[in-house]
Amino acid sequence: MDRLIFTCSEALDQPATPACTTEYGERIVRIVLMKTTSTLTSAASDGPTAAEFETGITSDYLTVINGISNGHKIEVSATELSGDDTVTGGSETHDVVYRVEGRIKVLNEDIARLTEKLDRYSQLRLWYFTDRDYCFGGDTGYLVSPNFKLRIFEGVGQPAYIPFYCDFIAIGQDYAKYDANYSTLDNT
């Protein structure tokens, strides 16, 4: 049992250095979107393989968007209950809303037209991929409300980009699946 009593003459306690064997990556570099009426058959519950995504892309029910810069996931909001609304009287967090956001580098007009069309959907399924070839979204993808903006031109020497964000409510599962071939996913 840890001691919570201290004196001014004692040395400071030193925390253990955490050892993490998994490097999930720091940036979101690609997303895959699918209509909610489509289904993606995955052999594993933690997410589809690159080959399963390729089948969906070839069959035209998945869309992959590469070239994302400044991509990340953040917590946007949550419902907090406290007091008489909880069993213990303490605070509890429910319905946490996360946001996947970033900038799509505009490489051609097809990407601009694609994002304008995708922005019209009220719900899509989303998988996102980090720079270390990890896929998040599990076997069904996150149910998101996609928001794609129009092209932004910041000035001379700055490439145009399309900002986007997709919000979803946490479902209590955040599976990460690794496949070295995720980096080869493309709509070509």
Image: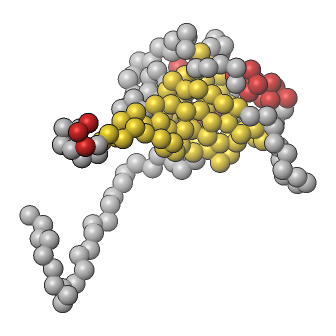
Name which residue lies at 55% across and 33% down.
167
Check the picture and name the quadrant holding the C terminus.
top right
The reply to whether residue 51 is in sight is no
Name which residue lies at 25% across and 80% down.
12
Q: Is residue 74 above or below residue 147?
A: below
Name which residue lies at 53% across and 20% down.
52
Find residue 165 and report its image quarter: top right
Q: Nearer the viewer, residue 85 or 98?
A: 85
* Left or right of 134 in this view: 55: right
Q: Is residue 83 above or below residue 157?
A: above
Residue 67: percent from the left, percent from the top?
70, 39
Residue, far front: 84
Residue 176: percent from the left, percent from the top?
43, 36
Residue, far bottom: 9
* Left or right of 57 in this view: 1: left
The reply to whether residue 136 is in sight is yes
